[in-house]
Amino acid sequence: MYIIPAIDLRQGRCVRLIQGDYQRQINYENDPVKKAREFSRDGADWLHIVDLDGAKLGRAVNTDTISAVAALGQLKIEVGGGIRDQDSIKQLLDIGAERVIIGTKAVSDFEWFSEMAEKFRGKIVLGLDARGSKVATHGWTQGSTQNMLEFAAEAAKLPLAAIIYTDISKDGMMAGPNFQRTKALIQAVDVGVVASGGVSELSDIKKLAEIGAQAAIIGRSLYEGTLNLSDAIEAAK
């Protein structure tokens, strides 16, 4: 298992939203490029970037910042947030993203998502955000009736790079991931599952490794110092 530190971008700076609520924002680093350098220095190979402005508006917004981070050439980058057309996917890949995360559009237009997964084989990640057993969309501001495991099983038939699973109730709460649903998802699909949300201590990482997660995304706990990135990477090994 490997560790992916996270940068959530809003208006060009690093923030966190508690449980995806835009009214519950915590501000951290003003310079995402500086933060990316720190993550690389501490041993990260990957970086998870969410364009929060893009997730809300349905189009890429923080592309200049993403491009600047990619230009460092120090980290493989996965990017999500408001990616709902082919041009946006191509734009992000062209500026240096290794893979692109699609959530809302995958749920609302699965035919299009399937087409993109085939067109950009091994470059598309399904962003599977859920409240309980149901998928959430539009930057977590809307729910759906789509069952998470059923949708994941169908999507896993595509040539995806990975599935990122986030339990919204856990995200930013630093209270541990949803191990039960993460394990159920891992058992339900043949695609690598990346766990996101709630990872706050080394025991969380070790448990995710034990149940078969491909990787774990860590955000708030790194910014607030409850987890050290170097230690987290070592624990994942």
Image: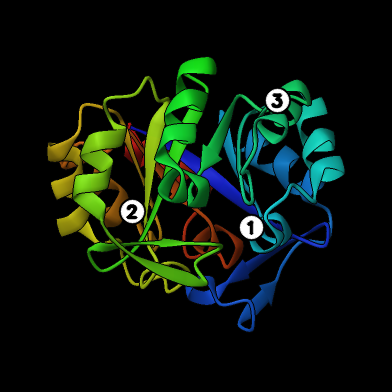
The residue at which mark 1 appears reads as 55
Location of residue 229 with respect to 143 vertically, above or below? above
For discs 2 and 1, the disc positioned in front in the rendered view: 1
Q: Quadrant of residue 156?
A: top left
As drawn, the label of residue 23 is none
If you read the primary sequence from the N terminus, does the residue marked by circle 2 or circle 1 appear first? 1
Judged from the image, the secondary structure of the residue bearing numbered disc 1 is helix
Extreme residue toward the bottom, this view: 23
Q: Which of 231 and 157 is in front in this view?
A: 157
Q: Quadrant of residue 233?
A: top left
**Mark 2 to mark 1 CA distance (whole Å):** 30 Å
The residue at which mark 3 appears reads as 90
Q: Residue at x 76, y 21 (%)?
A: 94
**Mark 2 to mark 3 CA distance (whole Å):** 36 Å
For discs 2 and 3, the disc positioned in front in the rendered view: 3
As drawn, the label of residue 202 is 2
Q: In the image, residue 32 lies at what x, y percent?
A: 78, 50
Q: Residue at x 72, y 50 (%)?
A: 59
Q: In the image, residue 108 lies at what x, y percent?
A: 45, 51
Type of the residue with mark 1:
Ala
Judged from the image, the secondary structure of the residue bearing numbered disc 3 is helix
Location of residue 205 with respect to 161 vertically, above or below? below
